[in-house]
Image (spheres, rainbow, N blue to C red):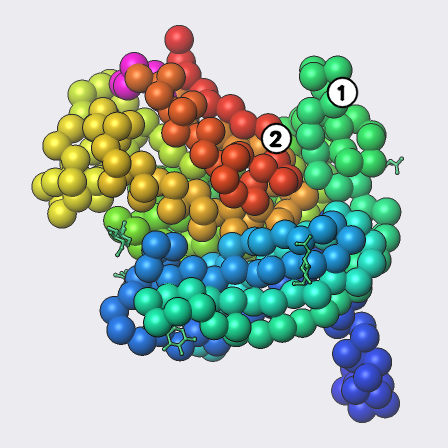
Amino acid sequence: MDTALAVVFLSPLLLLLVAAETPVYGLYETCVVSQLSGNQNPFNYTEVVTQGLFSGPDGNTTVDGFYYQAYERSNVGGSEKLTPDGSPQWCVRYSPSSPGSFDMTFIITNSSGTFTLKTDSFEASDDKLAGFIKLGSNQVHFQYANKSTYYPVGENVCWVGEGQGTYGYDDYFGKLAANGGNYARLWLTDRAWDDLTVEVKLGNMSLDDTWRLDYVVQLAEKLDIHLLMCTESYNNFCTVSDVICTWDLSYYNVANGGFLTKPSEFFVDERAKADYKNRLRYIVARYGYSTSVFAWEFFNEVSTTLHEFFVVFNLFSYTKAESSIGKFIEVVKTQCIC
Ligand SMILES: *[C@@H]1O[C@H](CO)[C@@H](O)[C@H](O)[C@H]1NC(C)=O
Ligand SMILES: *[C@@H]1O[C@H](CO)[C@@H](O)[C@H](O)[C@H]1NC(C)=O
Ligand SMILES: *[C@@H]1O[C@H](CO)[C@@H](O)[C@H](O)[C@H]1NC(C)=O
Ligand SMILES: *[C@@H]1O[C@H](CO)[C@@H](O)[C@H](O)[C@H]1NC(C)=O
Ligand SMILES: *[C@@H]1O[C@H](CO)[C@@H](O)[C@H](O)[C@H]1NC(C)=O
């Protein structure tokens, strides 16, 4: 009742001004309902790409957009159920690094040409947020953009209880923060074990799992937890091992309509590299804005069954150089068991 009355007495102009302010290092986001025609894959940046062109005190920056579906979550007997909320949209996210006025043009390029979806302006305010974490000048310690030291203390949270979805992260992250933790490691890669798997079919991202990951990243922002995002694991590429191997289920496997006859081809096959870069592009477009994303890990335990991990570094040099990840994130690693 009180809320309804308050809204009635706020002038539309004031509402507009309130909505148009974004803190430096906070989230600016804009979305447009997507109208797909033809049989283009909205997750394939070669077929259709949306981009935000930002111009302001940060200079001119181009940021990839992404295909998005909102959901409502509910707890059904201890399991999470997601119900789509509205139509799929194109969205773009940006985190301003300096205060001042920004102009934004949201464009789409598809087989018909390049079109403007929307233009917008917003003010970035200096709210003294801590900012992105990078390596300190001594190349040993981590520090926030505000120069304070960040010392990670936390857990590997590769998965939560089966079916719990984001409710499981409420539980784990809530307890982690309550006990002084400020760090967690996530897996974005293995549907058998987690609910945050980004690419679920060849070139096809999971709209519900990526929504869950939005939720988890925003939860981390609220609780001051910083995330290491691990984007691939050996499980998807191993055949013979004393651990869980799922190459038989891999969408890269020719047996499942993919194009690889054996796992190690992942590192050299041009189609596999293109698909993986496309996945990273989607991940960076969607989560790269967040100061809670602290570091990227490109491969979990890569040496468990694959011994070509040095190639991985070549593959990943792409990410920093060619995408907006380089603007924000400096910390990357690959884990091997040696
Ligand atoms: C390309 O995008 C424009 C703007 O949304 C749309 O009108 C057009 O139908 C799209 N073309 C194709 C082939 O999807
Ligand atoms: C992705 O997979 C879903 C679920 O099978 C399917 O409905 C959708 O059409 C696929 N999208 C693309 C672009 O292939
Ligand atoms: C930045 O973008 C604005 C608006 O699109 C344009 O007028 C200006 O020329 C651009 N500046 C540079 C240095 O490219
Ligand atoms: C920088 O941010 C950190 C983390 O939020 C905070 O603890 C610290 O007080 C801030 N330092 C300055 C100088 O504002
Ligand atoms: C993405 O689109 C391009 C152009 O249509 C196509 O060659 C490529 O195979 C697609 N990638 C995936 C993973 O579907």
**Magenta-colored stretch includes residue 306:** yes
**In the rendered image of this protein, does residue 83 appear above or below residue 253?**
below
State the residue at coordinates (83%, 36%). Answer: 146
- Residue at position x 26%, y 28% in the image: 268
Q: Is mark 1 within 8 Å of ligand 4?
A: no
User: Taking 27 as reference, is 296 above or below it?
Assistant: above
Identify the residue under disc 2: 330
Pick the quarter of the image with the N terminus. bottom right
The circle on residue 197 is: none
Front position in the image: 271 or 125 = 271
Residue 198 lies, with reference to residue 67, above or below; the image says: above
Any part of residue 307 in sight: yes
Vertical placement of residue 114 versus 275, above or below: below
The residue sitting at 40% across, 24% down in the picture is: 314
Q: Secondary structure at mark 1?
A: loop
Which portion, as a residue range, is magenta?
Answer: 302-307
Image spot of residue 259 (x, y percent):
16, 40
Residue 231 point in image, percent of width and height? 43, 36
What amino acid is found at the position of numbered circle 2 in the picture?
A: Glu
Q: Is residue 39 toward the left or the right of residue 292 in the image?
A: left
Q: Quadrant of the C terminus?
A: top left
How dense is the environment of label 2, judged by Cα within 10 Å: few (below 14), some, or many (20 and up)? some
What amino acid type is highlighted by mark number 1? Answer: Ser
Q: Secondary structure at mark 2?
A: loop
* Apparent side of residue 317 relative to residue 131 in the rendered image (left or right): left
